[in-house]
Image (spheres, grey):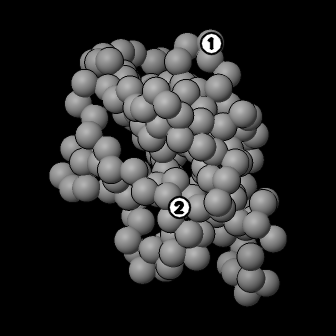
Amino acid sequence: MSQDAPLESRRTPADWEMLSDELNFSCRVWELRTRRYRHPINAREGDFYYLNSRDWAIVVARTVAGALVMVRQFRWGSNALSWELPGGIVDEGEDPVQAGLRELKEETGYVAKKGVLIGKCSPNPAILNNQCHIIFADECQLSDSGTAWDEHEEIEVRALPEDEVMQWVADSKIGHALALAGLLFYRVKLSQ
């Protein structure tokens, strides 16, 4: 932070007190909930909505040839096709690394002998309470068993040179925030 910043911007925000947490709506992948909070100093109260969701895992998968595996699929929220990293929901009680490797195989047909957790992030802490786990899987190869898409999935899979993927980032061809976070963790932790 700049030394020139006003004192008010250096003050630590208060940790609000949660008064209640109520379910509004539930579906297969998340719940819409309302939490009522009170500010600990000035006693202001308010209702705030959030999505209660299971954690997600995404995979930066590098093939034996050194290419990165990317997927493109239709996303209903943006009403558009999206280039991103393979990934999905971590099932209840499932290890995030195993979830990532499972999703990699299901979505792309690629398998890896092992994966490692290289980071995690909060996808949008303003409205989501979950974590996204970023997994790195090296020396990936196509399996003989192919893909196992969910009912509404239709996925294009490409293994691209790393330089091309990073150019796609620079050109905003990859706009999925979690894919960008995953590629950042990959570059910072593994590609130095």
Mark 1 element type: loop
Residue 153: x percent and y percent?
28, 35
> What residue is rendered at 42% in x and 80% in y?
171
Q: Quadrant of the N terminus?
A: bottom right
Residue 131 - label = none
Tell me the CA gap for discs 1 and 2.
Answer: 27 Å
Identify whether 20 is placed above or below 132: above
- Which residue occupies the foreground of this view, 102 or 169? 102
Taking depth in this image into account, of 9 and 85 the one nearest to the observer is 85
Q: Residue at x 76, y 66 (%)?
A: 191
Look at label 1 and name its amino acid: Gly
Q: Position of residue 174 (x, y in %)?
A: 42, 65
Q: Residue 93 shows which numbered tag?
A: 1
Q: Which residue: 45% across, 74% down?
A: 168
Quarter of the image with the C terminus is bottom right
37 in relation to 161, above or below: above
The picture quadrant where one finds residue 90 is top right
Element at label 2: helix
